[in-house]
Amino acid sequence: MRLSGSITALATPFTAAGEIDLDAWQRLLQGQLDGGTQGVVVAGSTGEAAALYDVEYDALLRSAVEIVAGRIPVLAGTGHSNTARTIEQTRRVAALGADAALVVTPPYVRPTQAGLLAHYRAIADDGALPVVLYNVPGRTGCDLLPETTAALAGHARIAGIKEARNEPERMAALLPLRNDGFAVLSGDDPTAVRAMLAGADGVVSVASNVLPRAFRRLCDLARGGDRAGAEAWDARLRPAVDFLGVEPNPIPLKAILSRLGIGHGLRLPLTPLSREHAGSAQAVVDLITQLEQSCRETSAA
């Protein structure tokens, strides 16, 4: 499996009563397919995985696999603070039809680099699914260093890394690890163009939930080496991307999705978008609508 291009870290829509909204979920997935998204992640941090019951997680993944029907890769978030639990979860999503496991560094426990190496090797050695490493120190409290990633990159069952640190030096250290069996993906929307122009394979994006066509175009321009075109298009997307970062993800994203008719709110301890930023949400919705329509018109021309 080779991961590349625009990959969406899907949000999980809820009903007004706080239940999983499978109708909204199916519409969100169909919008991704229609928009040219090249992969999806079910139950990552954007999908509020920590707030999902097992039965809900399974229903979301089962539905995604059915709707996608093999057209693009379906990744499932399986990372836990315990290695045995992560292996168990990875086996479960394999049985449900996922194509790969997105495995975040173990949150809260802060393992050493030797611990991270042993953790990921144990999951990959189990062989249930290809593993995509996921490094996001701001959420987990530990940092998967490039030398540790290099020691893992040659494993036959480790397919790549989603790197959410945004320093150019970090991406520069990882890009030499790219090969036919190991993809380097940005996990940071604001710097994804810079990463792809430097050689990254794509981005696992939050913003592509609401901008699937626009992010596919962004990835095509950047991965095609069109620096001027990619940077110009990135500048047009910037107000929407910046808005999605004004409060912890997925709070702003859920505010936008609800205005687009996809789901209602979040689960505690996440709370609705604050009044300070809520007034800007409709302007962002209007911009998103314009950008997506521009992409439709370009495709039809």
Image (cartoon, rainbow, N blue to C red):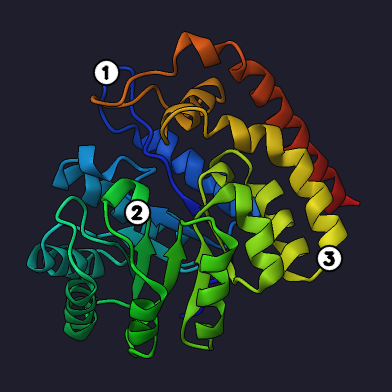
Q: Among all residues in the image, which is located at the extreme right?
A: 301
Q: Residue at x 71, y 47 (%)?
A: 214
Q: Is residue 268 above or below residue 133?
A: above
Q: Which residue is tagged 2?
A: 137
- Residue count near mark 2 (Cα–Cα under 10 Å), binned few <14, some 14–19, many ≥20: some
Q: Residue at x 33, y 67 (%)?
A: 144
Q: Which residue is tagged 3?
A: 226
Q: Which residue is tagged 1?
A: 17
Residue 293: give x, y in percent of width and height: 78, 37
Relative to residue 240, is residue 25 drawn left or right? left
Q: Earlier in the sequence, mark 3 or mark 2?
A: 2
Mark 1–mark 2 CB contact (< 8 Å) = no
Q: Name the front one of labels 3 and 2.
A: 2
**Quadrant of residue 296 within the rendered picture:** top right
Under mark 1, the amino acid is: Ala
Q: Is residue 67 above or below residue 235?
A: below
